[in-house]
Structures are given as structure tokens and as C-alpha cells.
Image (cartoon, coloured by chain):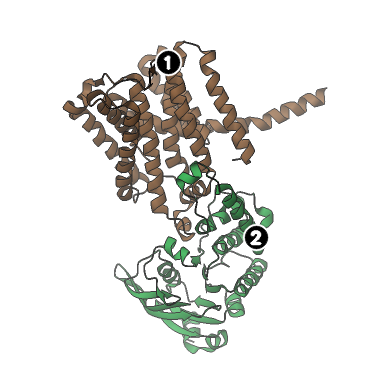
Chain colours: A green, B brown
Amino acid sequence: MLRVENITQVFGGITALREVSFSVAKGEIKGVIGPNGAGKTTLFNIITGIYRQTSGQVFLADKKITQLPPERLARRGMVRTFQNVELFGRMTVLENVMIGLHTKSRSGILSSALKLPGVNREERRIRTKALECLEFAGIADHASETAENLPFGKCRLLEIARALALEPEIILLDEPAAGLNARETADLGQLIQRIRTTGVTVVLVEHDMELVMDICDSIMVLNLGEKLAEGTPREIQENQKVITAYLGEG
Amino acid sequence: MGTERQVLLKYLLFSVAVLVMPVVFAGGYLLNVLVFVGINTMLALALNLLLGYAGQISLGQAAFFGLGAYISGVATATYGMNPWTALVLAACIVGLIAFAIGFPILKLKGHYLAMATLGFGIIIYIFFNETIDLTGGPSGLSGIPYFSVGEFQFDSDTKNYYLIWGFALLMILFSVNLVNSRIGRALRAINDSEVAARVMGVNARLLKVQVFALSAVFSSIAGSLYAHTMTFISPASFGFNFSVELLTMVVIGGLGTVYGSFLGAALLTLLPEFLRTLQDYDIVFYGLLLVLMTMYLPGGLVRIPALLLPYLAKFKAGRQENA
């Protein structure tokens, strides 16, 4: 599904990522873990077209997507969420998800301004679909609230619901459990597994080890910008290099 | 926002109010001022689409207004073109100019975008002043014909009122439709988080340029209408001060609201008529107004009804208790 080849990223004189390669199979949940500053978010920003890497290639379904801007990636079925939650704060919860359906609709400036036939029908279709996504994420009862008034836990869910509205092939979640309590994290884990059952591939950057070990099919470990290990949760837990990176020399 | 019916009802009420004004103020001086309210409404609305919805500032709106006026003026007064054709020609040219400069300058954000649009405004202003053979320079361009349809000429305040407000109402309808559509939603999304909007597949760069061009076209049409109702134009009307005045109208009326554009335009066009006694000190009054508005009414004039509602409800409840 997703293949990353030899990604290197240099900021000024600092190498944030060095020759990182990995691949994600269709329908799996892939975890990317590593200590703070390992380069996880940088890797995400490169894959999703927000940064331009120094070198290396990214392929989606065997097609090269290196350095395509995010809006093009969205049309190819790749979507992401953000570590610091990037919602449209002054819009309602429902409108946030309706933006997720932007690529599934086509009225332009002129047809919208003139309210040509079809514009209303398209609006109704988007609205219905957006409500379905909110129900899937379990926050449909907040539909008409302004997004910035939502409790933090629900913001995370809304961001995922909005991403799912795109009907993506692959979704990249950047620390979705950060700031959530145990119960919210458990709900999130279930939601991510439900996403997988709809056939969507999931890549997950996360610090919450319990969540990662629980739901991921395979895990890649980054440390100081380099790939340290890759394998099943069990293999990673028993890997001596990983233990050293996290806990230091014993 | 409200439901679709409320949106339509509001528009119809507004239109009726606009249409009966000349009957109320028949032939008076105020009607002449209301013609300018119409022009300024179009200009404030144009800026509001860009600033209030898409969140992109422009300090060069007066330049698009001026370009519309001068292209119309020169094409008709010097080259004898029909005013209607000139209006369309001006709108096309100005739209293309905005599209061309939009791609490079809308990459900029915040203060840098403000500076770039400011620079554009000043260049155009200098152009109006210096190309004396073409524009008449600082002494202005006169002899611009009125609009006419066959024998009928738009040569009185009442006729021009209906002409200008006809255009203004059309632009308001366009804008109401636009902001309540998929495109309006995408614009507000760009305003809140451009990166998230892009991740959701919104082509932010193109959309910003399109709205910039639309805003320029609205301003150009307002400029043509202005030229053909005044029949005389000079660069002084299209300087930096006017760009700032438009910005003030939008902020005072209410950012991101269609009718706020009208309220801001109406207030800032009518006030000078009542403040003539202050003479040059009126600028102090404007400054004070802007400071107080941003402090106590950051949502703009359009928020006043919503703010009064709780008090009204309390007042009603109190009366019922007493009864």
C-alpha cells in the first residue's frame, strides 16, 4: 500500500532522518514508535507532502507520490490527522466533516454563486454522508456545536471522523492518544480497529505503548532519525536494541 | 447562517427595504448619499469575501475600484465605447490582472500579504497620477457618459440609485449563495487552518486566488458604476486612505458576514454627513470608533441584535412577572 524508500531529511546541519525505509501492507495497522525527537512527526510530514525531503521516495499503491502537495494526496486516498489537532475551530462539528467531503463534490465558485440546479442536491448528499461519519466516530450528538467548544477527547474523534469522510485508502494518525485519559484511549483503540475493518490501512505514530502493542499488526521503531527495528509487537518488545533506546544502558 | 428559508427571507426583506428608500427620501440630498452607500456596500462586500471568509488581507482594494473606474472612463470618454461594454471590459481586465498578481502575492501571509497589496495599491495610484495623457492626471478625467438604454439615460439620483442598488443586490445574492455553499465552507476552513484544509483536499492556493479575483471583479464593477454616475473621476478617490476606509467598514460591520458589509458601508458613508460640524477632527472620531468597536463589539455591528436578545428576553420575562 505505502512504501517509503531511503528518506533522508536534513534541517540546517542537523540530520532529522537518515535513509529510512519501510512499507505498509494493505489493510494493516502499522505503528511507528520512538523516543522524543526520533523523527516520527518529520517522517509523517514528508509522507503527507507538508515537508520536502532532502532525498528519498514515497510510493502509494506502487505509484510515486514523492513531494505531491497534500491536496493532491487527498484525491489519491491519503489523509492524516495532527498531533496538535488541526480543526476548523469556528465551524460546527458537522461542517468540519463536510470539509472532509470536499473532494467528493464539485460545485465551483460560479455554480455556487448562481445556485445552479444540482448544488442543493449535492449539499444534502454531503450533509447526510457527514452525519454518517460522525455516527461512526460516536460524536453525532455534537453535530451542531462549534468545534472549538468541544472537549479535547472529542476533538481527536472529530479529526478522525473528518479524515474518514474522504473515504481514504490509508489514514495516518499522529499521536491520536496524546492528551486522552485511559477510557478515551480505549475507545480510540476500538475506533481504530473499526476503521481497519472497513478496509482502510492505518499508520499510527504513538507514545502510548499499551495502545500500540494492543492494536498494531506491525511496528517500526525510530531512534535519532534512523530505523532501529521493525516487526510484530512481540518481536519489538523482546528486541534488545529497542529496550536500550528507551531505557538506556543497564 | 440559519436555514435556507431564513436566508431567503432575510434577503427579500432587505431588497424590499432597499427598493422603497427612494420613495421615503424622494429627491432629497440623502438619496445621493445612499447611492454611495450602494457603491461602498459592493466594495466592502468584495473585501469581506476575501478577508472575512478566506482570511486574506488586502490593502489594495481601492486600486481595483480605481482600475474599474478608469478603464470605463477612458474607454468611453476618450474612445467612445458604450458604457455597458466598458463595464464588462473593465471587469474582465481587472479580473485577469488580479488572477495574474494573485498567484505570487497570495503565497504571502499576514503582514507580508498586507505589504504586497499595499504596494500594488500605491503603484496603481501613482499610475493614475502620472499617465496624464491617458488619465488626465491629478486634475481628473471628465466627460464620462451616463449609462443609457436606448433613449433612457441614468442621469438622476433616483435612476442611479436603482441602477447601483440593482447591482449591489445581485452581488449580495451571489455572495449569500457562495458563502453558504461548499466553496464558502472551504474558504472558512482555509481561514481556520490552511494546512488542515489542504490535507482535506482543498486546493487552498487556487481558491485564494479565485476569491481574490472575484473580489477584484466586484470592485471593478463598482468602479465602473461610480465613473458613469459621477461622470468625473480623479485619482484622489482611489488612494491608500480609501483602502483603509474599506477595511474599517468591513471590521466595523462584521468580518465574515454579508450584511455586515452593508452595515459598515452605511455607517461610514452616512456618518461624515452628520459629522460635518467637526470638520477635520472627524478623523479623531473614526479612530475612536474603530478602537471602541474592536474592544467592545469585535463581531461588528451585525452582532448587535444577538447581543440584545438576552436583555429583551429578560425585559419580557420581567413584564410578565409584574402583570
The CA distance from mark 1 to mark 2 is 55 Å
Q: Is residue B245 left or right of residue B10?
A: left
- The residue wearing badge 2 is A132
User: In the visual, does A138 lie left or right of B129?
Assistant: right
Give the quarter of the image for residue B57: top left
Read off the chain for label 1: B
Nearer the observer: mark 1 or 2; the answer is 1
Q: Residues within 10 Å of mark 2 (few under 14, many from 20)?
A: some
Number of the label disc, if any, that sits on residue B157: 1
Q: Amino acid at mark 1?
A: Asp
The residue most toward the left is B133
Check the image and name the residue furthest to the front.
Answer: B150
The answer for which chain carries disc 2 is: A
Count the numbered circles shown.
Answer: 2
Q: Nearer the viewer, residue A112 or B277?
A: A112
Image coordinates for residue B106, horizontal then vertical, percent: 35, 48
Q: Secondary structure at mark 2?
A: helix
Residue B28: image location, x then y, percent: 47, 10
- Closest to the observer: B32 or B269? B32
The percent position of residue A172, horizontal first and vertical second, equals 51, 69
Residue drawn at (67%, 68%) of the image: A183
Image height check: is B144 above or below A82?
above
- Residue B292 in sight in this render: no
Viewer-side residue, B301 vs B285: B301
Vertical arrangement, residue B159 with respect to residue B166, above or below: above
